[in-house]
Image (cartoon, rainbow, N blue to C red):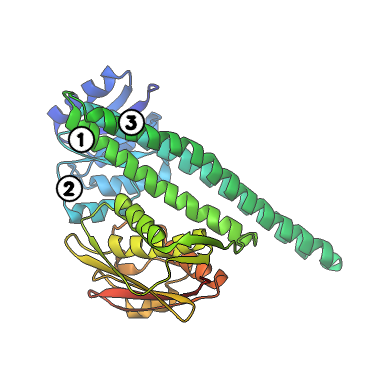
């Protein structure tokens, strides 16, 4: 990893020195050590930093969280939190400041180096995406100004507007495809690490643990990119109905296996299959998007030890199903927004998600000319009901 200019903000002098020694061992340059938020801001006024290591509890009037808010606004430097606490209350406080990473003390040097590298990578990618977004906004502003000055050329103006939409779709698709290849490589490497960890090795447990973390993170990011690509196609009207004959039982089992592999909590999926044709003809990809997203959401928003019921059956040329969970539920005042893009209910807390899953489900159901509805009660769970026309 290339050398970085690092500011350490830590009110424990011994911890600060140990951290300084660990970072300098990896050729990083420490521009200063501060025990308060005020002093950290003074150092940043005089010296340029690539990253800030920030303790949450500091001496002085500014704690680590408030200091980070000021750094985000004034300097736009990635911040890695250092804390001896990992309770939910602390995590809730820090998540609002969008930290680049969070390290629990006492830290492992290898793990610390990995966190710093990922924090820098995340910061650069976010800035690249922000730059692209700013460029798009500038293009949109310019086009809007052109429209105001060209009322007599309405047809030409509308054509330019259409070109902007196509440009945006191409950028989204190209960026998403660009991420897919390196993500596949990272996932393969993580899986190889887990295979190596099965052999005798002094760090066998740690290798397996971190390889699993990498794999889960890559799968989450890959799912997000898949969602972005889906709506890129949707916006370009490129989602077609491509029916193929499939074996029903194999399809259902594949969906459940994928959901279980991606799940990070201990939730059991209870499958109940009624009378259903051995084979059906429909669009495999669209059906997969529907059931994978519904089951993944049901598992994600359930607590450890809870169960998800997945019922599926055939009736009068339709495939009908119910996905029922006993998780956090959906607030009644927000239920009419559940299929909107990027919408996330206010009660999801720190549970990660993009807010795209249910909007993808609704789009797929519409393309298949099916129906979907749901019932939900906060704190008691949610049930989704899907009905899709199919051919035997």
Q: Earlier in the sequence, mark 2 or mark 1?
A: 1
| Residue 192 marker | 3
Q: Which part of the image, by quadrant, shows the N terminus?
A: top left
Position above or below: 48 against 135: above
Name the outermost residue toward the right: 152
Residue 341 appearing in the image? no
| Residue 10 marker | 1
Mark 3 is surrounded, within 10 Å at the Cα level, by few (under 14), some (14 to 19) or many (20 or more) other residues, namely few
- Marks 3/2: CA–CA distance: 30 Å
Question: Disc 2 vs disc 1: which is toward the camera?
Answer: 2
Question: Disc 3 vs disc 1: which is toward the camera?
Answer: 3
Q: Position of residue 40 (x, y in %)?
A: 29, 36
Mark 1 is surrounded, within 10 Å at the Cα level, by few (under 14), some (14 to 19) or many (20 or more) other residues, namely many
Residue at 31%, 50% (x, y): give it: 261
| Residue 86 marker | 2
Residue at 29%, 45% (x, y): give it: 67
Position above or below: 203 against 310: above
């Amino acid at each position: 990893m290339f050398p970085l200019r690092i500011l350490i903000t830590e009110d424990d002098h011994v911890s600060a020195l140990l951290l300084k020694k660990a970072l300098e061992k990896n050729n990083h340059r420490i521009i200063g050590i501060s025990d308060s938020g005020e002093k950290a801001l003074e150092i940043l006024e005089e010296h340029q930093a690539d990253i800030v290591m920030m303790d949450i509890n500091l001496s002085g009037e500014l704690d680590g969280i408030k200091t980070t808010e000021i750094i985000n606004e004034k300097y736009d430097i990635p911040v890695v939190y250092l804390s001896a606490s990992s309770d939910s209350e602390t995590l809730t406080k820090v998540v609002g400041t969008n930290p680049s990473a969070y390290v629990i003390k006492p830290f492992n040097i290898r793990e610390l180096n990995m966190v710093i590298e990922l924090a820098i990578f995340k910061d650069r990618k976010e800035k690249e995406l922000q730059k692209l977004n700013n460029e798009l906004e500038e293009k949109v502003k310019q086009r809007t100004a052109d429209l105001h000055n060209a009322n007599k050329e309405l047809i030409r103006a509308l054509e330019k507007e259409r070109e902007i939409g196509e440009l945006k779709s191409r950028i989204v698709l190209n960026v998403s495809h660009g991420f897919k290849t390196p993500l596949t490589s990272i996932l393969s490497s993580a899986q190889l690490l887990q295979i190596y960890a099965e052999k005798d090795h002094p760090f066998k447990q740690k290798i397996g643990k971190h390889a699993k973390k990498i794999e889960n993170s890559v799968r989450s990011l890959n799912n997000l990119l898949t969602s972005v690509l889906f709506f890129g196609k949707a916006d370009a009207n490129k989602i077609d109905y491509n029916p193929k004959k499939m074996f029903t039982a194999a399809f259902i089992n594949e969906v459940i296996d994928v959901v279980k592999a991606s799940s990070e909590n201990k939730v059991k999926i209870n499958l109940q299959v009624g009378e259903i044709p051995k084979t059906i003809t429909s669009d495999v990809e669209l059906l997969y998007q529907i059931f994978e997203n519904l089951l993944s959401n049901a598992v994600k928003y359930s607590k450890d030890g809870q169960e998800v019921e997945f019922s599926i059956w055939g009736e009068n040329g339709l495939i009908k199903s119910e996905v029922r969970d006993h998780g956090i539920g959906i607030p009644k005042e927000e239920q009419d927004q559940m299929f909107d893009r990027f919408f996330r209910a206010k009660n999801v807390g720190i549970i990660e998600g993009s807010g795209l899953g249910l909007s993808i489900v609704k789009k797929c159901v519409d393309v298949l000319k099916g129906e979907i509805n749901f019932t939900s009660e906060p704190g008691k769970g949610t049930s989704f009901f899907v009905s899709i026309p199919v051919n035997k």
